[in-house]
Image: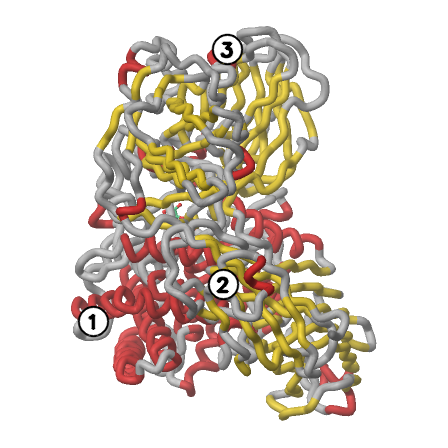
Amino acid sequence: MSSGFRIDNLRCEYLSNPLGLDERKPRLSYTLECGRRGAKQVSRRIQVASTEEALELVTADLWDSGTVQSEVVSQIEYEGKALGSRDRCFWRVLVEDELGHSHISPVAMWTMGLLGKEAWLSKWIAADPEVIERDEEATVPTLKDCGTPTQFRKSFPVNGAPARATLYVTARGLVEVELDGKRVGKDLLAPEWTDYDTRIHCRTYDVTDLISGAGQSAIGVILGDGWWSGYVGWQETRARYGDLQNSFSAQLEIEYEGGKVETICTDSTWRCETGPILSSDFMMGESYDARREHDGWSLPDFDDAGWLSSLEVETPAVELCSQRSEPVRIIETIEPLSKNEIEPGVFIFDIGQNISGWARLKVRQPRGTRIQIRFGEKLKPDGTLYTENLRLAKSTDVYICKGDGEELWQPRFTFHGFQYIEVTGLAEPEEGSCVTACVIHSGTPPAGEFKCSNPDVTRLWKNGLWSQKDNFLSVPTDCPQRDERLGWMGDAQIFLRTATYNMDVAGFFTKWMVDVEDAQTEEGIFPDTAPRLREGENFIGLDDLIGGAAWADAGIIIPHTIWRVYGDTRMVESHWQAMTAWLDYLERTNPNYLRLNDLRNNYGDWLCIPSDREFRTHSPMKNLLATAYWASDAAMMAEMARSLGKNAEAERFEETFEKVKAAFQSEFVNEDGSMTVETQTAYLLALAMNLLPEELRDAAAARLVENIYKLDWHLSTGFVGIRFLNPVLTEAGYPEVAYKLLLQDTYPSWLYPVKHGATTIWERWNGWTEEDGFFEPTMNSFNHYSLGSVGEWLYSHVAGIELDHTACGFSKAKLKPYPCQGLDWVEASYRSVNGLYKSSWRLSDETWNWDFTIPANASATVWVPAAEEETVESEGLDLLEKRDGWLLYEAVSGSYQISVQRSAMRAAGKVAT
Ligand code: BGC
């Protein structure tokens, strides 16, 4: 064995040791960590066994792949014995490297869940409405009409310590479970959001260690509203996605030594009662009266004689499925930076960061003290909380003290978007801070980091990352604060590439793409939001919220991106029909290959700055945008089809692309390369999506630059154009213009909000301006990620870490940074599914120094901005070719240092100034 070679990050279906999968052929992956140049895998052997011990035997009992000569380390499909309900699978991989040394990974595992309806023995139960009706306090909600969570319990005999105990739980609503007084798992807001008409998640927990095993045990469940029956979207009433009756089903399987299994199932013998949570809702907040706690309610000896029997309700006729993404958790906590008593008894805490989550309260107050906690993203000039932009969301938590010393509390079934916390109602002064902010979101693993010599640019990158964290909560939402929080498709697709750099979002989008397909109409129309918004009593109706250009097209963009970034061909295969149905629909409704029909609630270049507003609402721009996206969909389909060997379909989509492109040119492109609609976004789409005749590309790019110049080097795009702005400028030969826009800090620009204290990306360029203060509160979130999609360019063009499009999954990269005068140094890293890439450069008067790392088992084409080899100091790189003032090298895994003379870069026309 050679030292320094490690097999790491063992994952099954993108998750670390997942429980309760329903995928019968799960895919395995791992990474190789080794600093040695050229380190790679020559062969691998995967072993899967039903016990950890069996792995040590010569042949693993579930699957032994045998030695496979291959460099592939991800998307490896399990090909062993057929897996059934409850199977446990322990696995490891044996790798032989290029020196002939062998390496063994640590052991990882996954388990299978309850597969098929027969395995699910439990009834679905709901609270007897009587428990609420007889409870005076629960029927008088403090804030607005919200649901009152209810508690359920059941005690049962146990025959000694279990060998293994597994809990399966699902709900229409949200559950938190306790066993013998201890919380089960750390998941929050479970089960997560799905298209409830089609499927509901089931969560699986290993609870072996929670069962005391001494004669009698008990299970307790708190059931709240969440997406099923609470407020979601801009509505006046609850239950837009489900109905007002919350229900759940749980199955606890206790296995003893010797194989005997006892199963505890939900049924009407479970007892129910209201408890301390008076009301709870995502938008409205949670009210909790600690005096109403039922001490020991999930312990076996609790007296539940006064509780009522549960109601058995009909089992939903939809699929119960395993959650494919990382659960929502408390990811970190933040202590306030300051506390300010703005008027007697009104305390404002600033946590220094706009987050999604809640405040954990720690107080010592007399019994009955009613503490109110409110949340806001901003303060008004007089120092009070700015809550107008929350619209109908009250975002108010209330805690009533029981008064027995120090009390620690946090809500369960709500979350807020905020940087400031207002606390009122304290009867006694509290020393220091009585709140800690808890950041909650889906636990997508961190993947990338970026920093540079300009702290505002570093902050801009960080703001994008924070908006991602704050909005990736079960689905990619638009915002975490106001009465909306929907899975808007346009926002998600615009930011997706940035998101993949910041975090490993493969599991997250695997889950969400299922929601997207579930929301597709029978005619093949993808929705604008997923899960799809049901008909509501106000605002737009269901029929408008489908098929939006650049929104619905996410149905193609997501699989295409996940395929490219993670090498995930299964995502493409499993959504192929849905994607084809969408392309069929576009062709059916637009026979002349301009996308003009059925555009419904067409958003255009949403929230482009006011001076371009006329273009947004003006139909030629909308038609241009819609047609461009259609062409791009067809191109992506053709590319995926080719790669998957679907050649006839590839040809069909290539043809569609050509037809749409031709129609686009005749309708929107003038002979001199100008466009019929003079907006930055029109040029950006035409250039990015390859819709111009080759000979007009330069002229179009020059017009784009002229447009930017006329605006005194300012951008004017909305959500849609912004993603393409800097990548297109850079690749069209104007990196210096891209950097000018990056470093611009007067309105409108990326750095304008940063200069004015933004800690997340704002929804609008003019969310707040020096001239006008806050924009109208009707639509003014300070935490929408779309305008932060420049993050992609920071990684791919500034640091220069980009996919090599000839190889999916970053097994090969294109390392091509564009150094620029305005930044002295840049440092970035990106953990791909094939391992960790790094790139950092420093510009001095004399030289440009670049250090980069290619992970073991990967390779890269390295682009050095110089024309002549003699001006470059490098070691271990083989020159491939010279192209347009770049030297191209082929590099194997390992770390490299390169130094280029500035004069040589200037000669090659390569340092942006
Ligand atoms: C959301 C957006 C979304 C849009 C659709 C808004 O209310 O917050 O981000 O994409 O509606 O135009």
Q: Is residue 198 above or below residue 710?
A: above
| Disc 3 residue lies near ligand 1 with CB under 8 A | no
- Quadrant of residue 616 within the rendered picture: bottom left
| Disc 2 residue lies near ligand 1 with CB under 8 A | no
Residue 704 at what x, y percent from top left?
A: 47, 71
Q: Is residue 721 above or below residue 101?
A: above
Q: Which mark is drawn over residue 851?
A: none
First along the sequence among labels 1 and 2: 2
Residue indicated by mark 2: 497
Residue at 43% across / 13% down in the picture?
303
Residue 212 at what x, y percent from top left?
A: 54, 29
Residue 272 at what x, y percent from top left?
A: 35, 20
> Can residue 666 be seen here?
no
How crowded is the residue under tag 1: few (<14 C-alpha within 10 Å), some, or many (20+)? some
Residue at 65% across / 74% down in the picture?
856
Q: Is residue 470 left or right of residue 282?
A: right
Question: What's the residue type where badge 3 is placed?
Answer: Arg
Question: Distance of mark 3 from mark 2, alpha carbons?
Answer: 49 Å
Residue 464 at what x, y percent from top left?
A: 56, 52
Residue at 69% across / 32% down in the picture?
337
Question: Distance of mark 1 from mark 2, alpha carbons?
Answer: 27 Å
Circle 2 SS class: helix
Q: Which mark is drawn over residue 291?
A: 3
Residue at 42% across / 87% down in the picture?
695
How crowded is the residue under tag 2: few (<14 C-alpha within 10 Å), some, or many (20+)? many
Residue indicated by mark 1: 587
Q: For this rendering, which residue is in front, 774 or 314? A: 314
Q: Is residue 109 above or below residue 365?
A: below
Could you tell me which quadrant the N terminus lies in? Answer: bottom right
First along the sequence among labels 3 and 2: 3
